[in-house]
Amino acid sequence: MTFRSCILCATPRSGSTLLCRMLSETGVAGRPKSYFHRPSMLSWATAVDVAADREDLETFKRVLEAVLERGRGRSDVFGLRLMRESYGSLAGWLEALFPDHPSAAGRFEAAFGAPLYIYLRREDKVAQAVSRAMAEQTGLWHRAADGRELERTAPAAEPVYDADLIASHVAALSDLDEAWARWFHAEGIDPLRLSYEELAAAPGAQLRRILMRLGLDPAAADGVVPSVAKLADEVSAAWVRRFRAERTAAL
């Protein structure tokens, strides 16, 4: 099968930013980003420089055209990161655009080309929840390998341990992963499965694995190094240990 698109299905704090940047840097696997992540179509349009003042099917068609161009870059493969929270909005517009297709998978293929789905998940849900809680509290979501801040959503603040917040994130992130799993099963999709832990341990090897599944030359991964730094530190590790100890003691 010849894949024309690469759709990364993920949840927050699962390593998707790292993987998107590495795929982009190969020059052959598109430029996967969260083009449909924002809550409104007008926001989607603004992000890809499409002038729009209404949310309708014609606007979506123009946004989709611009996204396809951005997501391919100079390659022949379209790249997209789709967070589970964003799935519903995109799926709804694709259903409106392709009403004759009987399945969501068919509509995704009609819009983006034959896709390789990558299911990226984090096995350690407590560590994932701690990472999300700390990002929300500190405002810092991503840092470059050279130490520069890549994404900040709020002024710098010190994180404060909150077991209830972590527990709520564990539950929410687990629900999001289960929703992806149910969708793959319902749509008859067998995705390439990749964990955060595998990606963190051997990013180059996992990148080559993806390129090979796409039918691309794995040598395109040569020289691509992680450009996103891990934010986990001794504080986050201590939170993980404390949460597990407290919750185990409460059982």
Image (tube, rainbow, N blue to C red):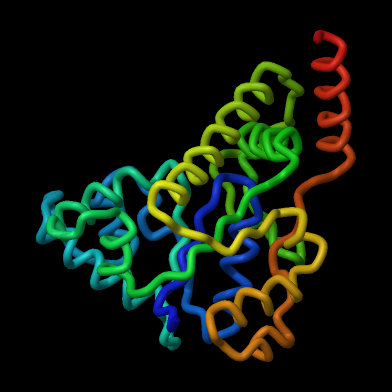
Q: In which quarter of the image is residue 22?
A: bottom right
Residue sitting at 86 percent across and 37 percent down? 237
Across and down, in percent, residue 26 comes to 60, 83
Indicate left or right for 115 with 213 as reference.
left
Observer-nearest of 241 and 116: 116
Residue at 85%, 35% in the rendered image: 235
158 up-or-down from 120: above or below: above
Measuring from the top left, give residue 113's x and y in whole percent: 33, 74
Residue 158 in the image, given as x and y percentages of width and height: 73, 31
Which residue is depicted at the point 42% across and 74% down?
A: 5
* Residue at far top of view: 250
| Screen quadrant of the C terminus | top right
- Compared with 172, 36 (above or below) is below
Q: Which part of the image, by quadrant, shows the N terminus?
A: bottom left
Whole-percent x, y for residue 217 in the image: 61, 91
**Foreground residue among 150 and 169:** 169
Report the side of 132 relative to 160 (left or right): left
> Residue 234 falls in which quadrant of the image?
top right
Q: State the count of labels.
A: 0
